[in-house]
Every structure is written in structure tokens, then in C-alpha cells.
Image (spheres, rainbow, N blue to C red):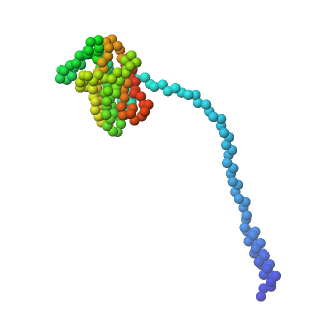
Amino acid sequence: MVSPSIAWSTVAAVAIGLTGCATITPPAPVPTPPTLVPTPPTTVEPVEIVPRTVRIGQPAINGSLVFVVRGVRRAERLVDEFDEGWNAPPSSDFIIVSMSVRNISRSAVFFYPSDQLLVVDGTQVEPDDSSIWPRNGQGEIQPGLTIHVELPYLIRNGIQPEAIMVSDALYAIGSPGSPATRVELK
């Protein structure tokens, strides 16, 4: 039999040995977040956005359509492919605007000649619809296709048009405040 003092001293030695083997590590320090110093607001100078001037021969994008005005000519008489003709009233001329219209969207777009307005003395003039002009191009333009149109406008003799306002009608309807794109003719 083992004496009680030896038993207790063995238990004490084992306890001390176990305690000595265990190391207590202090908890890892928790990093402190960096102090955020507010930066003073920067001042941004307002920038005036000036639209690019589009001229004859340059592309003018409006909505899903790209317009390129190819030329402008004056005529006293319109003639169709059947040799039918219409004369301009006295003291007036037809201004004929030739342009190509390309659909750049992924769906068909309807082209409305009546939405292409000629600017004359600051006033917008619709194409002349009193004459049946076969080359006005009204209709649907399939994706990626281009049509060529000639739009007649009836104006007073001697007046030079300033510009034409080209428009994808559905774009203008769907986006209030989306103006037509101006193409300078002078």
C-alpha cells in the first residue's frame, strides 16, 4: 500500500507538471481600425456640354436612327418615276433634302418623313405633303438597313434653309425632352 503522503505528493507533482506544460498565451491584439479623417469636399467646376455641330455629309444620331444628309437642292417642279409632276406655287420653290437613314437598333423602326423638319428663318417647316412624292421613304426600316429618301419642302423664293431637324419619332415620344438632332445646311 502507498502511503497517503506519497499519493498526495504524486498527485501534486502530476498537477504541477501538467500546469507547467501548459502555456498560456495572451489573446492576439485586435487591430484598431484606422482613424478616418474626412477630406474636404472638392469643388468641381461646372462643364457646359456643347453639342457637336453636325453638317451635310456627317452622321446625326437620334434614337435608333442615323441620318446623313447628302445634299440640298432647289426645284420649281417635282417629277416622279411616272413623269407625273407638280409645280411649286408662284413665288415659292421646293427645297429637296436628300438623306440616308440607317436603323442601328436590333428591331425594326418606323421612319416618319413628316417628323423631319426644315428650319427656315427660325421656323420649322414640315415636308410638303400636297404632292405625292414617291421618294419620301415612309415605312419600316429593318435592323442594320439603310434607306435613301428625298424630302420636299415648300418655301418662299430666295430663302435659304438654315438646318434640318432629324428625328426618330418613337425615340422622341418615349423620351420626353429628347429633341431632334440639328443638321446645319449652310
Residue plotted at (40% across, 24% down): 182
Q: Specify the quadrant of the image occupied by residue 20.
A: bottom right
Q: Residue furthest left?
A: 82
User: Residue 121: x percent and y percent?
Assistant: 39, 16
Residue plotted at (70% across, 55% down): 29
Q: Specify the quadrant of the image occupied by residue 183.
A: top left
User: In the rendered view, would you say 30 is above or below 85?
Assistant: below
**On-image quarter of the N terminus:** bottom right
Q: Residue furthest bottom?
A: 1
User: Residue 178: x percent and y percent?
Assistant: 42, 31
User: Residue 65: x percent and y percent?
Assistant: 35, 31
**On-image quarter of the C terminus:** top left
Residue plotted at (48% across, 25% down): 50
Asked if one can make out residue 144 in the rendered structure from this viewpoint, the answer is no
Residue plotted at (38% across, 19% down): 123
User: Residue 119: x percent and y percent?
Assistant: 37, 20
Figure disc tally:
0
User: In the rendered view, would you say 91 is above or below 54?
Assistant: above
Query: In terms of depth relative to the viewer, which is nearer, 4 or 33?
Result: 33
